[in-house]
Image (cartoon, helix red, strand yellow):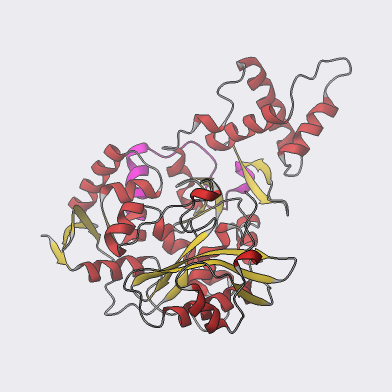
Amino acid sequence: MTATLTLAQARRIALAAQGLHRPRPTGPATARSVGRTLARIQLAQIDSVNVLVRSHYLPFFSRLGPYDQAIVDRLASRNPRRMMEYWAHEASFIRPEHFHALRAWQKRAWVGAAGLDPAVRERLEALILEALAHGRPLTAAQLTRRLEHDSPRGEAWGWNWNPVKRVLEGLFEAGTVSSAARTPQFERRYALTSAVLPPGIPDGDAADPDEAILTLTEAAAQAHGIGTVRCFADYFRLPLRATAAAVSRLVAEGSLEEAGVDGWPDRLYLHAAAALPRTATGRALLSPFDSLVFERRRLERLFGFRYRIEIYTPAPRREYGYYVLPFLLRDRMAARVDLKADRLSGTLLVQAAHAEPGAPGDTAAELAAELQLLAGWLGLDGVRVADRGGLAPAVARAVGNRNLSAASYVSPVD
């Protein structure tokens, strides 16, 4: 049987699957609610850019409102862990129960030491594993210093930061070592994976590949609510053909059913547990790396919103700005804003604000309220709006601040 849906219904299913279809909870966010949010979205992508706030903190703010960022740090660093780092969509916080399944399919040799001389790599691996087995978690820099110090006098030390870091990344990709925590400078503190996995998830070999991809494909389908095989494969960066085979199995088992959506010609699949709310009433600024916007073609089909990250685009060629967040208002992407946290002045800088075609009439007011909420969460004293983008004047009026002149526009450092 094939479910037949309108595009508006498909949007609401997608938003509900991601926990973005209704206003945020009114009470303070707790470790339990942060953990539940991760269980819903399955992963939170990590990115080191800190022009606003590190990206993995934003999905929880988008869904829960102001919360203590230390909760995420604790859930990822204290046993029993509710999240751990591994390769998924990209480097991500994942649910620990998916670790062995992901190991079965992650093949990112480029992140490690595949190009090193095998003898150097093997010796470094042995030294690193020995150091981590008999000590506390260490950063790559700390391990480098320790290995230099422990080398016998007179032995040539031909290694530097890059080989040690590359070998560590290779061991991380293989699942032999993991991140026990991050330093304030965002460096990983490496530990043996056996010391990081929570009780009940034994250290050992990767899962059976066929069962692993079935687990991950269903998790991706739950997080989407509705999507294509390509959407589900992209979520954990799984091979397309193997994902298609897993989708066929899930259809046969009744976990997925085929669906048709007006205006979306691709072959679609609806998860059996997907909710279809009558309305979507949420509001959120979304990280450029939010799981709702991972798959750009799906985003454009569902919301008519063409989105590209312009961080690596030369400044003169940027269309919207350096760190641009989509603004979700109810069931549409209503605007996009280029944001920067100016921590020296204690100000959230809105460096550009652009309304989308057909944006609701209350977009500026709702965006202003969201910006003020974000500024408060980041510990900033206020919001300043630069006169860039057609929505900027209305947003500036709504936040009650004078527009910054073009001359005083503050560009992020490239």
**Residue 357 colored in magenta in the image:** no
Residue 92 in the figure: left or right of residue 74: left
Looking at the picture, how far across and down is residue 414, in whole percent? 62, 48
Q: Nearer the viewer, residue 34 or 378?
A: 378
Q: Nearer the viewer, residue 91 or 174?
A: 91
Q: What is the x, y in percent for residue 205?
A: 48, 36
Residue sitting at x 79%, y 20%:
157
Give the vertical position of 25 relative to 11 (above or below): below
Q: Residue at x 31, y 52 (%)?
A: 297
| Residue 60 in the figure: left or right of residue 328 | right
Above or below residue 288? Residue 64 is below
**Of 206 and 92, the residue lying toward us:** 92
Outermost residue toward the left? 1
Q: Which residues are magenta?
A: 193-219
Corner quadrant of residue 239: top left
> Which quadrant would residue 386 be assigned to in this image?
bottom right
Q: Quadrant of the N terminus?
A: bottom left
Residue 244, image x and y in percent?
25, 43
